[in-house]
Image: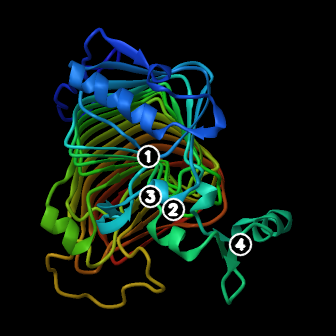
């Protein structure tokens, strides 16, 4: 239990331990920080963090004002606190972010250090009321298809270049290839993010990786809808996670569960497990709640309830592909509202990122993904391309999938089930009376 939230899922989630801090605090002003967009405060902020950690822990306060900085590097036992009207803007100078070995999109990568980072730390938090702006426009390529004519004209008038096809603008090729996530905590224990806003990230926005005991409560994550790889929250290979009372507006997927990609993810072999998600809202994104497509280390014991998705491309999005491997299982979803979903309210697609459909069965091997034991109930949908699209593999059908008490209206297309077994659709109500097409499947019950 955390706060007044009680776990109600079909599995028991262990207690999520909270970070604790000594009763000691400093202001970044004490270390020479100066307010205003013309002064870079990287040294002052990091010296304050280091001093508090060496003192035994406590709070580092960023007061109200406009604070420019380069990379902030967290240390153990520090709560970085943003006061009301504290605005932290990260510099657009790439040399302020050294190259590091990291992971991105589930694979090892060398990229710039995240504007906010920490590795092998304990008892860390970012709390308060202010805003972190990642200055993502300095880093991100932009697709012409995602912009209006006026927006495209504005982007192409900036320093940068357009590719030969004329459909992508980027500030410079070097920046696009090494752009970091906004916040990356790796192999940390007892982590809390509360109250603050993270926005305009160079790539993904918030990325806890290989962490244990992570609490995300009442944060806001905002990326422009055209932001390339602009995921809001990617929880990767983490254990014991709570995500509650938060607002996400993403340029890509919103609330994402991941565990590494292909052989690298299987070699890491760390699943994302014991995740509790409740009382969140998604205003835009490729998917409201997403598992994959990087899930090669496995995903298990996920409970999501009482969330609302408005205008996302897909509502509940499960995706993988041949070559990924990994097992996704024991997923429980309850009381989800969706409105104006562009494509499917529910997608399970084991043939993600392919131009065609799997025409032939292949051998099952370590790269074969498995999706099983997934329960969804009490879903209310107003407006979607399809109610659901369930598509497994010939050699590995989706298995034990349950959709109960799903009420939909304003559905444009027929729903489908393909390469699946032991599927139960119960209490499904569609005011538009669209059909459900079942192919290459067994033990499918619809009533």
What residue sits right under mark 1 in the picture? 71
Q: Is residue 380 above or below residue 256?
A: above
Where does residue 201 sit, x and y in percent of width and height? 53, 51
**What colour scheme governs how the chains and residues are painted in the rendered image of this protein?**
rainbow
- Give the image location of residue 59, x and y in percent: 36, 18
Q: Which mark is residue 180?
A: 3
Query: Could you say whether the residue bearing mark 2 is in a helix, strand or loop?
Result: loop
Q: Is residue 186 above or below residue 152?
A: above
In this rendered view, identify the residue nearer to me: 84 or 381. 84
Which residue is located at x 62 percent, y 66 percent? 413
The reply to whether callout 3 and callout 4 are in contact (CB within 8 Å) is no
Image spot of residue 204 (x, y percent): 46, 54
- State the count of labels: 4
Whether residue 355 is situated above or below residue 352 in the rendered picture: below
Q: Is residue 37 left or right of residue 197?
A: right
Q: Quadrant of residue 22?
A: top left
Instruction: State the SS at label 1.
Output: loop
User: In front here: 207 or 89?
Assistant: 89
Label 4 sits on residue: 145
Q: Secondary structure at mark 3?
A: loop
């Amino acid at each position: 239990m955390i706060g007044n939230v009680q776990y109600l899922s079909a599995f028991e989630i262990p207690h999520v331990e909270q970070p604790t801090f000594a009763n000691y605090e400093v202001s970044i002003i004490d270390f020479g920080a100066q307010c205003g967009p013309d002064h870079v405060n990287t040294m002052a902020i990091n010296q304050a963090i280091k001093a508090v950690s060496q003192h035994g822990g406590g709070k580092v306060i960023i007061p109200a004002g406009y604070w420019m900085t380069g990379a902030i590097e967290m240390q153990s036992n520090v709560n970085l606190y943003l006061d009301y009207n504290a605005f932290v803007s990260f510099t657009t100078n790439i040399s302020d972010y050294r190259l590091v070995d990291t992971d991105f999109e589930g694979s090892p990568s060398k990229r710039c250090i995240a504007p906010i980072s920490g590795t092998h730390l304990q008892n860390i938090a970012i709390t308060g009321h202010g805003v972190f702006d990642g200055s993502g426009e300095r880093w991100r390529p932009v697709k012409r298809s995602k912009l209006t004519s006026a927006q495209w004209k504005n982007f192409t008038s900036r320093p940068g270049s357009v590719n030969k096809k004329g459909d992508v603008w980027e500030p410079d090729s070097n920046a696009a290839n090494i752009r970091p996530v906004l916040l990356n905590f790796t192999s940390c224990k007892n982590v809390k993010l509360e109250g603050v806003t993270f926005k305009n990230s160079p790539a993904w926005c918030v990325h806890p990786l290989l962490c244990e005991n992570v609490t995300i409560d009442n944060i806001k994550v905002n990326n422009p809808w055209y932001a390339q790889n602009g995921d809001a929250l990617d929880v990767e290979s983490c254990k014991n996670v709570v995500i509650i009372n938060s607002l996400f507006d993403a340029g890509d997927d919103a609330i994402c569960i991941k565990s590494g990609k292909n052989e690298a993810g299987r070699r890491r072999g760390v699943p994302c497990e014991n995740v509790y998600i409740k009382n969140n809202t998604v205003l835009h994104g490729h998917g409201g709640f997403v598992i994959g497509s990087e899930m090669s280390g496995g995903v298990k014991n996920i409970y999501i309830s009482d969330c609302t998705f408005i205008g996302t491309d897909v509502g509940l999005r499960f995706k993988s592909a041949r070559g990924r491997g990994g097992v996704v299982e024991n997923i429980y979803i309850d009381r989800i509202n969706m409105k104006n979903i562009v494509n499917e309210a529910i997608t399970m697609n084991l043939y993600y990122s392919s131009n065609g459909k799997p025409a032939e069965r292949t051998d099952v091997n370590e790269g074969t993904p498995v999706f099983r034991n997934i329960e969804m109930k009490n879903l209310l949908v107003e407006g979607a391309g399809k109610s659901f699209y369930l598509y497994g593999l010939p050699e590995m059908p989706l298995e034990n999938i349950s959709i109960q008490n799903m009420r939909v209206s304003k559905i444009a297309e027929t729903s489908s089930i393909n390469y699946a077994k032991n599927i139960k659709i119960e209490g499904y109500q569609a005011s538009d009376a669209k059909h459900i097409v079942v192919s290459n499947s067994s033990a499918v019950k619809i009533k």
